[in-house]
Image: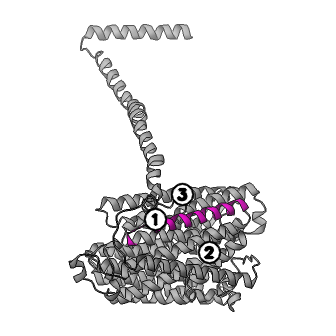
Amino acid sequence: MSNTFNLVWLIPALPLLGFLVNGLGRKSLGKSASGFIGSAVVLGSFIFSIMTFMEVRQGHTGVVHFFDFLNVSGLKVAFSFQIDQLSSLFLLIITGVGFLIHVYSTAYMHDEEGKDFAKYFAYLNLFVFSMLLLVMGGNYLILFVGWEGVGLCSYLLIGYWYENNNYTDAAKKAFVMNRIGDLGFLLALFWLIGKTGSMEYGQVLQTATLSKLTAFDITGITLLMFVGATGKSAQIPLFTWLPDAMAGPTPVSALIHAATMVTAGIYLIARSNILFSSAIITQQVITIVGLATAFLAASIALKQNDIKKVLAYSTVSQLGFMFLALGTGNYVAAVFHVMTHAFFKALMFLGSGSVIHAMGGEQDIRNMGGLHKHMKITSITFLIGCLAISGIPGFSGFFSKDEILAGAFGYNTIVYSVALFTALMTAFYMFRLYIVTFTGKFRGTHDQEHHLHESPKAMTIPLIILAILSIIGGYIGIPEVLGGHHQLAAYLSPVIPQIHHHLSHETELILMGLSTLLVVCSITFAWIRFRNFKINHNHNSLASFLENKWYIDELYQFAVVKPIQKASSLFQLFLENRIIDGSVNGVGKLVNYGSRQLRLLQSGQVGAYVLLMVIGMLILFVIQFFVS
């Protein structure tokens, strides 16, 4: 075991320390101290993550054991960290992007009061700790502890401005919908323990162990795990919490709902790829759900006017692409897209925060326009993000999305066609967002225009770094057809086997050329359509349907929420009030009544007492005589 691995415990410990210091000292620490501590601990984790990554690149991997976390009835689960190619890559994404978002937050949240500012950074540090625990855990139990931790932090950060009831409702919605998914994951773990007697990756994900499982067991376990993944990674039907989660501060949206937490489901399936590859039915379900989610969310994003809502539905759609890759067995492509998506989507969320900061809190893109001349750095970096997510050659998104589309083509041409059309919608709605926001004439108020300005360096420097990563991040996955060797696939090969769909180089080049040509056409159409944008409140039925998000929230309200509320009212009226409360109150009334009747025996009359004594003696005499 490498000496560096003796220090891996510092990677999650530093953010935990930051949480404790900022949380306990929130009333005494100043804003500068809180921001510095919160950012410095994540920077420390990033440095140790780089050291760990370099060790793994040299071939040093293994499980770092600390102590026995659970040891009962033959079930032994260690508190240990799995240090390998997959976990080390995720460590870099979480701590690297996380550090940039922490730095950005020092400026974005500066108007908060000192104790609230420290509390915000404490929550962010706790989230980073939980996410690191999730990806570093050496078994499913430690992963689940981190899994629940990020769910808690998501609730705390979405509802950070808790005085607004809409924000607290959004936080509760996220928490409840994640609990639904978490129940599925928990049942999968119980099933796994019952059949294998272990939760350690090194034991469970072995061919000898998997041979003990029947096809029904594998399908059931993987489907339940996928239910957990649909909750965390916002897939149909548990996706509606993520757009509402935009109620939280914008840096929170960038960290949790673009780069890290929502990718937990992808990490779970990628980590368990041996298990999922044995479950054909589950893979088909994942493919269908991922494709449907990508299409549905992209169509909704076409007509959203809130800048963060567009990015939120874009995130749901991109997560759908990742699940499509997982379902088609393209695990490397899914992880690749996790990485590139973390760069360009964090960039665009932070860019939207810069716009909102300049606009005094305005989020409706219809009231913006012409911001490029006032915010050139934000505009240029946001444009780079749009080019990357659209899959323009030379940008990171091109390589990862092309790999997903190629895998879909090798899997099924219908699946490929829907995925390609969804990619075209992505390019259209992202450039609609950019054109309406940054080009043309300003449509806001005179006061807003007077205060337009570029954001401070603490906000623009992270944007520039993420923009650079959005350009160069994809070059570690250059395919052979373009003269590369896909270094990422080679790096991950000990953990994730490469799946080849046996496409010829000519076919791959044709697919690349076709998607690029159509994406350029889609962008051109968006430019023609929105370059002279004017607010138009007249919508046709399809536009209203998309703007109202397919009425899915209303459907859930009608089909799920209202029946549960109605059933709750009935249970409260009959079961709670009449049976449970009636039983408890009845016992009290019975005791009270019995006491009043017994009290009558205490009359104070000596004759009555003598009579009772004689009667008692006769009863005892009769019992003794007849029983004996």
Q: Amino acid at mark 3?
A: Pro
Q: Which mark is residue 334?
A: 2
In the image, residue 47 lies at what x, y percent?
Answer: 50, 88
Secondary-structure class at tag 3? loop
SS type, badge 1: helix
- Mark 3 burial class by Cα count in 10 Å: few <14, some 14-19, many 20+: some
**Callout 1–callout 2 Cβ contact below 8 Å:** no
Tell me the number on the disc at residue 242. 1
> Mark 1: which amino acid?
Leu
- 92 left or right of 121 in image: right
Q: Give the dominant element type of the magenta stretch: helix, strand or loop.
A: helix
Circles 2 and 3, Cβ within 8 Å, touching? The answer is no
x and y percent of residue 52 in the render?
58, 86
Residue at x-position 47% and y-position 8%? 621
CA–CA distance in space, label 1 to label 2: 20 Å
User: From which residue to which does the magenta span run?
Assistant: 280-307
Local packing at callout 1 (Cα closer than 10 Å; few below 14, some 14-19, many 20+) is: many
